[in-house]
Image (cartoon, rainbow, N blue to C red):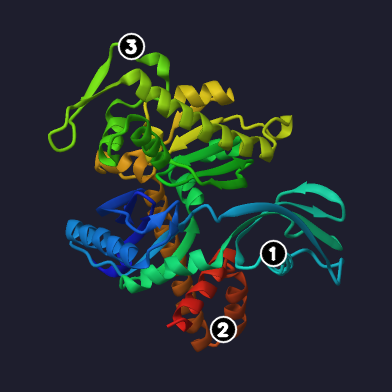
Amino acid sequence: MDQVNYSVGLDIGTTKIVAIIGKENEYGKIEVLGIGRSKSLGVHRGVVNNITQTIKSIQQAVEQAEANSGLKIGSVVVGIAGQHIRSLQHSDYITRANSEEVINEDDLEKLCNQVYKLVMLPGEEIIHVLPQEYKVDGQAEIKQPIGMYGGRLEANFHVVVGQVSSIKNIGRCIKSAGLDLYNITLEPLASSEAVLSQEEKEAGVALIDIGGGTTDLAIFKDGIIRHTAVIPFGGNVITEDIKEGCSIIEKQAELLKIKFGSAWPGENKDNEIVSIPGLRGREPKEITLKNLSKIIHARVVEIIEQVYVEIKNYGHEEQKKKLIAGIVLTGGGSQLKHLKQLVEYITGMDTRIGYPNEHLAGDSDAEIASPLYATAVGLLMNAVENKDKRRLKTLEAEKEKEMVLQGHEDTASMTVKKRERKSVFDRWSEKLKDFLDNAE
């Protein structure tokens, strides 16, 4: 198959690394052609802390996906998360030279670029600048100001900030694994693409992606992302607690959590016991399921309460900012038994588990439609979307060449103006790519 026809998403997680190859079918759905996963070694709480091992793990996942699909992986879209990601609200304005002219794309770009000049803490860089709503000459709550008259254009922005070194390290790993970095995107945004519907984003929804090392939060309202946060706890701390609390090894703790774990202690009777083989000829250990779920419950409550603090910080308790669609849980950690009920109990918000199957072709493997792969599927969707945009741009450029050759320079220059501007994030990705190329 031609390299142009398929795209690749690469999810570098704390527990697993997933490479997923796919393409868009004729119905606009994503058809998965191959998937590879490997144990993630060298990533801690979403941040690379051992480059060599991460490269090895990436190569394993990529090789498996290639063997699975019979295709060669060249460039990938990768997700970024980790405890270094933070977000802030910022307002900014520009005064236009001529208020007799209507507001155009250039004005919006000028305003966005101004936000990029914000002074960050040493070693931090702005990843996303997401406009929330605009004001023109004091008139508030404008969603799209293009075409309006006005002298002063201001906007509220949601600014996502990350550590430069962490971003560069991911780029380094991709390059050393013999891959090209096609694009880089925030993981909560990728997951939300895969599991949320447009109606939910309009009504107001909080997406909680419980991974191995981190729990990512993305809040949408009126179809716009309003708040993002990364909480440095995930499924691994629950496993760690079981390991400590029951004095067993990590592998056994993980199995216990997956097979018998529950977030709701009341569900288990006192006499339900599981026996764990002892190490090297020692007596087997007996653990009551009630104790197990008490350990899990304590840690899960802590994680959910931290997330709920972030939801309150966004302002969910104000009538205007109410999240009508409630909470969507996804990620590997969302598969814990009775978690949905516990989240509803703590937050009082409607909750459902998010599966990334809405955008997948009907004949997709059931395994891929698991919440475990939400981020990977979201990254693949991002890769497919970017590929389509670039294809359109190439077609437009070719059309322009033809026009110029035929002597239609005016029409050609109009097409140039009409051509979609690069999003702020595309420009940022290019800047990062340049940096990585020069860092050789």
Q: Is residue 270 above or below residue 360?
A: above
SS category of the residue bearing label 3: loop
Q: Is residue 47 left or right of residue 153?
A: left
Q: Nearer the viewer, residue 5 or 344?
A: 344
- The amino acid beneath tag 2 is His
Q: Residue at x 53, y 25 (%)?
A: 350
- The amino acid beneath tag 3 is Asp
Q: Which residue is mark 2?
A: 408
> Earlier along the polypeptide chain: callout 1 or callout 3?
1
Q: Are marks 1 and 3 in contact (CB under 8 Å)?
A: no
Q: Which residue is mark 3?
A: 270
Is the residue marked by circle 3 packed among few (<14), some (14-19), or many (20+) residues within 10 Å?
few
Q: Nearer the viewer, residue 139 or 337?
A: 337
| Residue 331 visible in image | no
Is the residue marked by circle 2 packed among few (<14), some (14-19), or many (20+) residues within 10 Å?
few
Q: CA distance from mark 1 to mark 2?
A: 33 Å
The location of residue 232, given as percent across then percent down, is 51, 46
- Which quadrant of the rendered structure holds the C terminus? bottom left
Q: Are marks 1 and 2 in contact (CB under 8 Å)?
A: no
Q: Is residue 293 above or below residue 80?
A: above
The location of residue 399, given as percent across then percent down, is 47, 77
- The amino acid beneath tag 1 is Cys
Q: Are marks 3 and 2 in contact (CB under 8 Å)?
A: no
> Earlier along the polypeptide chain: callout 1 or callout 2?
1
> Earlier along the polypeptide chain: callout 3 or callout 2?
3
